[in-house]
Amino acid sequence: MGNLRTSLFCTAAVFIVVFVFGGSNSAPTALRVMTFNIRLDSPNDGANIWKNRRENLVSMIRFHNADLVGLQEAQKHQIDFMMQLLPEYGWFGVGRDDGKQQGEFSAILYRKERFDTLTTSTFWCSQTPEQPGKGWDAAYQRIVTFGKMMDKRTTTVFYLFNTHLDNEGKVARAESAKLIKKKMQSVCGTYPVILTGDFNSEPNSEPYKIITASNTSDALQLVDTRTISKNTPHGPKGTFTGFDITARPSAPIDFVFVKKGMSVLSHGTLSDSFNGFLPSDHYPVIAEINY
């Protein structure tokens, strides 16, 4: 009987060790960073109107355990609803129309228990970035919201930028990409940098090439997290569906970029659906990142 008890104890001990330490390559300090175009609240979306999908959208953020989320197309009342269901998150950002609460936000959500926001700011993708206005050939006003953040677990300081480039203006997208890189150069110093967004641009486009460019005059190089993920990227490549659950988009327009030298453990394009419906017309993208 004594030998049986010892055997059972050893078996249980082995099970506990495997359960706690096995099955994940994630470092405890890794950041799970998501970019998510949540689609504005439009009455023209039929069965896909905001009130029919908002709980599912929040569920995706919660279930996939995002630490940081860059939102696009978010209106203030949409953010307010999300915060009611996600009290563990804080957020910052301004509306693109007036720099206050009007128009779409490129807001950033963050886990309050893990991060402190040291500084936050927004600039416009235009020739006059410090004030509201459209730039170049853009159809709409476009903004970049960013924050200087501190990870309380490690006291590491980093920057997170989030944007939504214009859907029509080809010149505006390229010039906005240049402006974002220029702003990063001026404010980020040697800190780690993350950039999230809906870029309305595929990997073979000029804006993508500008963002990921490396040359002697631009010391800050950004890398697409999908291309350097240590684990095989999960999910489809394309990210825009227009709410069509049967769509097979061939290329992404939503990205998470990181400063060269940061490591990426995993990358996923999340095609979760609910009873035949999608929570947005874009798939969110999530990357697990180490500083």
Image: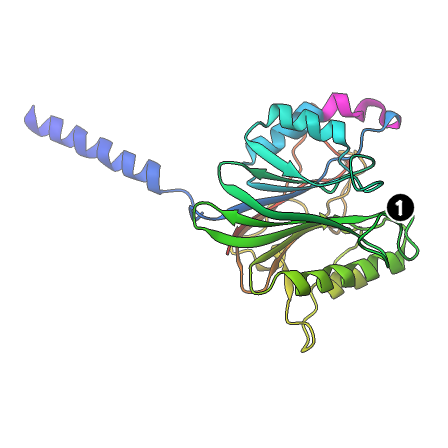
Q: Which residue is drawn at 67% across and 41% down?
A: 284
Question: In the rendered picture of this protein, how many numbered marks are placed on residues?
Answer: 1
In the figure, residue 192 lies in which quadrant?
Answer: bottom right
Q: Position of residue 169 (x, y in %)?
A: 90, 54
Q: Which residue is drawn at 80% across and 25% down?
A: 49
Is 270 left or right of 114, judged from the image as shown? right
Foreground of the two, 218 or 31: 218
Foreground of the two, 234 or 157: 157
Residue type, label 1: Tyr
Q: Looking at the image, can residue 274 be seen?
A: no
Q: Does the magenta stretch include residue 143?
A: no
Q: Position of residue 88 (x, y in %)?
A: 54, 30
Is 28 left or right of 229, judged from the image as shown? left
Q: How is the image coloured?
A: rainbow
Q: Which residue is drawn at 85% across and 24% down?
A: 46
For the N terminus, the quadrant is: top left
Q: Looking at the image, can residue 40 be seen?
A: yes
Q: Where is residue 143 in the image (x, y as percent from the top left)?
A: 78, 48
Foreground of the two, 24 or 90: 90
Furthest toward the left, the residue is: 2
Q: Which residue is drawn at 69% across and 25% down?
A: 81
Mark 1 crowdedness (10 Å alpha carbons): few <14, some 14-19, many ≥20: some
In the figure, residue 67 lies in which quadrant?
Answer: top right
Q: Position of residue 194 (x, y in %)?
A: 61, 54
Q: Main secondary structure of the magenta part?
A: helix
Residue to which mark 1 is pinned: 140
Q: Helix, strand or loop at disc 1?
A: loop
Give the magenta part as a residue range.
44-53
Is 146 left or right of 265, judged from the image as shown? right
Foreground of the two, 269 or 116: 116
In the figure, residue 159 lies in which quadrant?
Answer: bottom right
